[in-house]
Amino acid sequence: MTDAMVHASRSNPVDDTCPICGRPADTCPAESRVFYVRNLDCAHCAAEMEERIAALPRMNRVDLTYTTRQLRVTCPHPEEMRLKFQEVCQAVDDDVAVLDLEDDALLAAQTVSAKSGIKGWEPDAKRDLTCIIIAAVVFVIGLFLEYAGLAMPGFAAPFAFLVAYAVVGGEVLLHAARNIRKGQVFDENFLMSVATFGAIAVQQFPEAVGVMLFYRVGELFENRAVERSRSQIIDAVDMRPETVGRLVDYQVESVATAPDGTVTDQDARARAVEVVPAETAQVGDYLLVRPGERIPLDGMVVEGASRLDVSPVTGEPVPVSVEAGSAVVSGCVNTSGMLVMRVDRPLSESMVTRILDSVENASANKPQIQRFITRFARIYTPAVIAVAVATAVIPSLVTGDWARWVYTACTFLVISCPCAIVLSVPLSFFTGIGAASKLGILFKGGDSIEALHNVRAVVMDKTGTITKGVFAVQSIDPASGFTGSDVLRIAAGAELVSTHPIAASIVAAARGLGLGLDEPTDVRETAGKGIDARFRIPDGAERRVLCGNRALLQGAAIDVPVAAAGGFPGTCVLVAIEGEYAGRIAISDEVKPDSAAAIAAIGAQGIQSVMLTGDGEEAARSIAAQVGVDEVRARLLPEGKVDELLAVRERYGAVMFVGDGINDAPVLAGADVGCAMGSGSDAAIEAADVVFMTSSLVAVPQSLRIAKAVAAIATQNIVFALVVKAAVMVLGFAGLASMWAAVFADVGVTMICILNSIRLLHRKY
């Protein structure tokens, strides 16, 4: 929430009735909506528009993001409020328009993407360029008349300068006049107008024209640089297809289905292919994907086999083999065979759209440093203007040299424009978000990057994070009176309804041996402990089966041999039947090949690594020794993980947690930065601040490096802008800096900050 929003919520009275629908205000629900602000070309103006919209009554949330030009609001009847939002924005800048694009999320994304980049010079840019060229020619003529020593009338050179000034500065003067009428005084147009008028007043005609000319040239290329950087970032993550090849009359001759009804294999042929807009493809349509084409939508392969380049989505360079029955996500590139796929999600819900949305949405969650700079800009400009007025008046009254001190004050007015400062931070974070998305790292906000920069410890779950999460039964050790087949068959029946990877491995092992499984009549699963199941036996009675860890069995007063859960560097599932210990099933997981390198890279950044797991102490320490984790906490229930995370934070500082299971959701939400593997559960991904589309742990040190790089670039931009502006002000006061230097401190510094931010997109992480 912005400062303006907080202020609005405290100061704006809530009407008893809604002005839109007339119903009682407390019964009129707030809705979220996204608008597109066309022709928004000033970061400082965007901050002021956001503040003014937030001051309107009953605005719950307002975020106007300059880098994407998106206005996100939460309020009653946002669609009816659009014209009011436009009126407020046009009070700051007449040229902007607020467009309603939320009716179609796909159209919104396409419009933003299409408008983000300048293809050549647009009509407004061509007009500005024409004015600049004409003014430059006349300006050169004026210089020739002034310095060539020709016998020309004394007014010829000033006249040429004034003509050039009118051509290049006319639009600036008109903007300033319109804004003054609306009470918008201290904007860049007004400041440039007053500064150049001051130069003309003290007979500095060449500098007045030259400064206005330099300002317009810088403004033109500044806008183009911002547009190109925005386009470059959006294009890097925008993998949405424009069209798809839909198969017409795709006849299914034989279809094998899984128990849940999904198609697993087909022997069918297409009669025809029609090219249709991607957004018109429906769930259940069949698409043809040729070699070299991207997978257009999320779905499943029903015919053919190929290898997919998944790096555009996950950043993972290793190709993935797919065949009939394989799930595929949009954005991956089909590298070899021809595929027929069934659409499971429309374009608006597919991975390519989710990635683009995440980049655009992330810019709306502003980091604290950006909020600080916005507040600072409100103070900075009036303060510099006050210094300029004092500089023009006080020394002049003392020395009588009005020409010098008015000229110096004019340089201060040019320097007082805050655009370089306001733009430098959001562009840095937006570029960092774009760079991360190319590596399959999705930040949910600039605040997530800022929090990641401060992390001092990385806490990780074991299963599915450090290890592959693919379990396999290694051995079965039955107790006296039981056989291995009995223990496995009964345990597999109890685990049938569980979705835990360990349960799946037990069921798979039983089915692989052809054991018949009985379904339980009642199942209770205790997170972090195991399964309590009831089975109906032939005589009508019930049989109770427990499958889990020692705590589960001991809680049911079952004696467990001391050696039952030890002597194996993996997970041991203990089985009890009717209150009697029946045996154990030993299961192991495999460490991901890049986990050790990733954890070493985390340590190289001076960050502590901690592993939390519900597994036994021996298995946990065995895995930790293989990958080099600094600290291990084993035998933890979900609530125990939260307690341990708080203890780690108390000891080291800000904590990042990485996990992928549904049991990790509470810890993800409680960490300073929660990170979820993209292959994990929806609950974990929803609770996380950062999502790693690849299952590789290498993404963790990469994300930390990106966060540090973004923070460094943002700081560099702020310090550079303030130091240059302060230096030029000091030199100007000493009479050593002209208005040319002042324009460089404004437009030139802004351009350098933009170019410095774009470096983030091309760095190696």
Image (spheres, grey):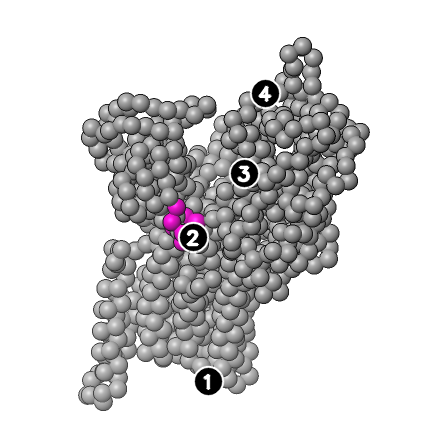
**Residue at image mark 3:** 681
Q: CA distance from mark 1 to mark 2?
A: 52 Å
For the record, the magenta segment spans 312-320
Q: Tell me: 145 left or right of 523.
A: left
**Residue at image mark 1:** 736
* Image location (x, y in percent) of residue 32: 49, 37
On residue 676, the disc is none
User: Does residue 53 sit above or below 504 in this rendering?
Assistant: below
**Contact (Cβ within 8 Å) of mark 4 with mark 2:** no
On residue 519, the disc is 4
**Residue at image mark 2:** 315
Quick one: label 2, few (<14), some, or many (20+) residues within 10 Å? many
Q: Nearer the viewer, residue 575 or 389?
A: 575
* Dot 1: element: loop
Q: Residue at x 43, y 67 (%)?
A: 756
* Dot 3: element: loop
Q: CA distance from mark 3 to mark 4?
A: 25 Å
* Image location (x, y in percent) of residue 730: 52, 80
